[in-house]
Image (spheres, grey):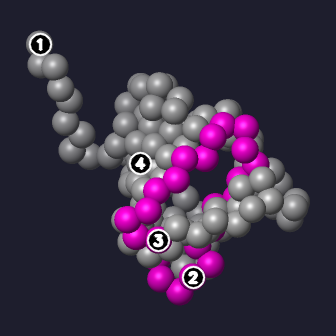
Amino acid sequence: MKKYKIQKSPFVVPTTDGKLIEEHWGNSTQNSNISIAHMVAPPDWSEPYQTPEFDEFTIIVSGKKQFEIDGETVVLEKGQSILVEKGARVRYSNPYAEPCEYIAICLPAFSIELVHREEEGVD
C-alpha cells in the first residue's frame, strides 16, 4: 500500500460572493483533522465575523488580505502569513482593487458547524 495520496481534483466549494475555494484536503476528502484550501478573494470581498473552533493559518500568495481580529486590524501581503487561533472573533476581507490569492489551513478541518459565523450587520 502506498504511503502517499495525490490530490488531482480539489473540491470546488459553491459560493455566491465570487470567492474561489478549492479544498484539496478536509471534510470533502473525509479528513476532519485538517483542511487545506487554495482561495482567491475578489476585490471588495468580505464575509461576516466568526468565532471558529479551529486554528486557521493563512499564507498570502498574491495581493493583500485584511483581518479584523478581536478589534485589531491586520493587513498581510504577498509572502506573509498569520495564525488566527480558535476562539478569536475574526472577519476576513479584501477591500482592495486586486484579487487576493492565498492558502488556508484549518486545524481541525473547516466546517460550517465549527465556524460560528455571525449574522450580517453585527459589529
Among the two numbered marks 1 and 3 on one chain, the one whose residue lies closer to the N terminus: 1
| Residue found 46% across the figure and 56% down from its top | 81
- Span highlighted in magenta in the image: 77-99
* Amino acid bearing label 2: Tyr
Identify the element where label 2 is drawn.
Answer: loop
Find out whether residue 17 is within the magenta segment.
no
Among the two numbered marks 4 and 1 on one chain, the one whose residue lies closer to the N terminus: 1
Instruction: Tell me, yes or no, whether the two marked residues, 3 and 2, touch with CB atoms within 8 Å.
Output: no
- Which numbered marker is on residue 96? 2
Q: Residue 43 in the image: x percent, y percent?
A: 54, 79
Residue furthest to the top: 1
Identify the element where label 4 is drawn.
Answer: strand
Mark 1 closeness class: few <14, some 14–19, many ≥20 residues within 10 Å:
few
Q: Which residue is mark 3?
A: 77
| Residue found 11% across the figure and 13% down from its top | 1
| Residue found 52% across the figure and 67% down from its top | 76
Foreground residue among 27 and 84: 84
Identify the element where label 1 is drawn.
Answer: loop
* Amino acid bearing label 1: Met
Cα distance, mark 2 to mark 4? 21 Å
Q: Residue 69 in the image: x percent, y percent?
A: 71, 55
